[in-house]
Image: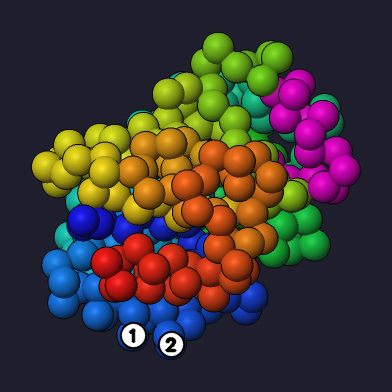
Amino acid sequence: MIKLIATDLDNTLLNKESKVDPETIRLLERAAEKGVKVAVATGRSFASAKAIADRLGQPSPAICYNGAAVIDTQTGEPYFMDCLDPELVREILVFARENDLYVQLYDKDEIVVEKLRLDRHPDPDLDYAGYREVGDFRQIELFDTPKILLAAEPARIPGVQAQLEALFGDRAYFAQSESHLVEAMTRGCDKGSALRRLREILGLKKEEIMGCGDNTNDLPLLLESGTAIAVANSVPELKAAATYVCEGERSEGFNEAVKKFVLEK
């Protein structure tokens, strides 16, 4: 029996407008009546994760920053948060400048940029989180950040990720959540490792978890789930790892999986 749904947000639970579909709320209310909880598992910041979890009526832990943190959405207290080594951050910032990459850091849930560029990354986090412009990352005192977001033209991203992994792969984990993004977390941090730690906190078994996603950063999440769901718009690598590929895209696919594996069973 499924007791926890661990789900990605963008292009998975959320619809094309990056909103929560009313049907999703109704289905999750029915699931909650059966004792099923939901944990959002997102690359987004905690501010976004909490806002969407609140819309779902699910005051549960949230996996944020692509697995670098699990935070209680009721209290705001982290179960854990793994931040990047400051020297590694410096080195990645140098690489980003040399390769004309747009960069975002995160300081206590505030987005930090040299200059906000929505043309480089129209960040949905900005609907819920504030931002700070600092001018030049080389001139500031660094702070603990759980993630570095790097943006470029989609055609460049595979090459950029390959370079990052070659240079820093022994110290960082790199994941792609959108076609124009690469995100860096501490090595060993991903949605799967976070789900495994959360599962232990909640006292659940792997077979009691349904994981849902769409992109390669969701692969570790699916591998740690007894029921692994890929929505129809998922990348091929995720579909290959899934136990079920939905007919519907995004929220329609998510709703389809909830009906099939949670409510009908």
Q: Nearer the viewer, residue 92 or 143?
A: 92
Residue type at mark 2: give it.
Answer: Pro
User: Looking at the rendered structure, which numbered label has been put on residue 117?
Assistant: none
How far from the left and from the top, in percent, is residue 169? Answer: 60, 17
How far from the left and from the top, in percent, is residue 184? Answer: 57, 33
Q: Residue furthest right?
A: 155
- Vertical placement of residue 11 versus 161, above or below: below
Q: Is residue 126 visible?
A: no
Q: Which secondary structure, mark 2?
A: helix
Please identify the quarter of the rendering in which residue 248 is found.
Answer: bottom right
Q: Residue at x 67, y 30 (%)?
A: 93
Please tell me whether residue 151 belongs to the stretch shown in magenta: yes
Q: Residue at x 32, y 58 (%)?
A: 5
User: Looking at the rendered structure, which numbered label has been put on residue 22?
Assistant: 2
Q: Which residue is mark 1?
A: 26
Please identify the quarter of the rendering in which residue 56 is found.
Answer: bottom left
Please identify the quarter of the rendering in which residue 70 is found.
Answer: top left
Q: Which secondary structure, mark 1?
A: helix
Q: Nearer the viewer, residue 14 or 129?
A: 14
Q: Residue furthest front?
A: 265
For the residues bearing labels 1 and 2, Cβ distance under 8 angstroms:
yes
Q: Nearer the viewer, residue 152 or 56?
A: 56
On screen, residue 144 versus residue 104, left or right, reads left
What segment is highlighted magenta in the picture? 144-164
